[in-house]
Image: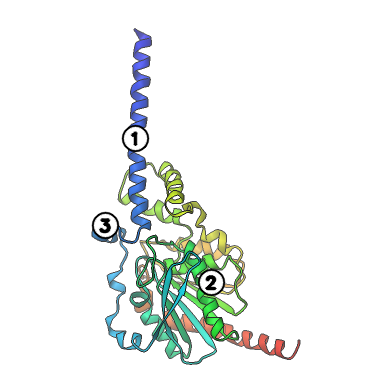
Amino acid sequence: MIWLLIVLLILCGSLYYIYRTAHLKKGVRYFVSAIIMRNNEWYVKEGRKKLGIPYENRINENVDSFWDQGADCTLVSGDDLLLTARVFDQCAKTWVICLHGYRSDGRSDCQGPAEKFWQAGYNVLVPDLRAHGRSEGKEIGLGWLDRLDLLLWIDTVLEKDNQSRIYLYGLGMGAATLLLASGEVMPTQVSGLIADSSYTSVYSGIRSSLPQFSRLPIKRFLRIANRYSKQLVGYPFLQISVTRQIGSNHLPVLFLHGEADTFLAVSESNTLMEATAGTKQQVVFPEMGHLQAVTDAPEYWPTVLGFIAQQQPQTLSDRKDVENGN
């Protein structure tokens, strides 16, 4: 009788484990698809609000007249996607490539910043990242696939003028994209990085947002999500480590973050600040939420434009040394 009871307990435990695992896998597939897939129904209806991504708040209709001054530019990615960007060229020697945030697009996030850089005398390139805006793609790159696309955009600028100086400016996922790219071999014309509210890894983002949607065990969830993301898009979430990539970076970096950011904690920027091997500067804006400082902090643009100005004299001096054969 005792043995029968033990067998029943083992059987019940096994069935419960199988049920829980199946339930967990279903939840993982649902959540990972919502994160990655471009036209995800749940994200459009509920996810945007629950995640607290201020997409609508970043749209600025008042500067459309500036946006209309630009011209379209396209390139084909390494996996044959047609990617689109807006170009603002005033024949300057310095370019700024502006990268928008998650599930936004270049016009919504970067038309204001693009105008600021333009007024400062710089040429500007504003891509729509893959699976965003007018660029092709069904799966969002989360910065990992986009880092390689960014290198192609840099090459596009250099094909026009290989003596250009290039600065990379990004918001949210765009900031993560340029920091991920910094771990690759970058052209010497890239002179500095400006990262506003980057994450350290996709894992850290999931860890912070998952409890809002589910009581599933986070560690098991992440292990399964890692396998499923590799199956779905060809790379595991664990591979997307901004912290690891920026450890190979030697370019100057300006880290920006809102102190009151509840979507990506300021500790993310603190970690990245410690990880980079390049010269670095961090500015935290008091009482500012996620990407709010771009429009609401008076010191934001003097800080950003001042960072670029600081790099220019050294770059010009280096070029003179090269020209003189020193």
Asked if disc 1 and disc 2 are in contact, CB closer than 8 Å, the reply is no
Question: Alpha carbon of mark 1 to alpha carbon of mark 3: how far?
Answer: 25 Å
> Circle 3 is placed at which residue position?
41
Q: Is residue 159 left or right of residue 323?
A: left
Q: Residue at x 50, y 57 (%)?
A: 240
In this picture, residue 32 sits left or right of residue 316: left
Which part of the image, by quadrant, shows the C terminus? Answer: bottom right
Asked if 56 appears above or below 325 in the picture, the reply is above
Q: Which residue is tagged 2? A: 151
* Crowd rating for badge 2 (residues with CA inside 10 Å; few <14, some 14–19, many 20+): some
Residue carrying label 1: 20
User: Residue sitting at 51 percent across and 66 percent down?
Assistant: 78
The dot on residue 255 is: none
Residue extending furthest toward the left = 45
* 10 Å crowding of disc 3: few (<14), some (14-19), many (20+): few
Determine the image quadrant of residue 69. Answer: bottom left
Q: CA distance from mark 1 to mark 2?
A: 43 Å
Amino acid under disc 3: Glu
Neighbor class of circle 1 (other Cα within 10 Å; few <14, some 14-19, many 20+) is: few
Of marks 1 and 3, which one's residue comes earlier in the chain? Answer: 1
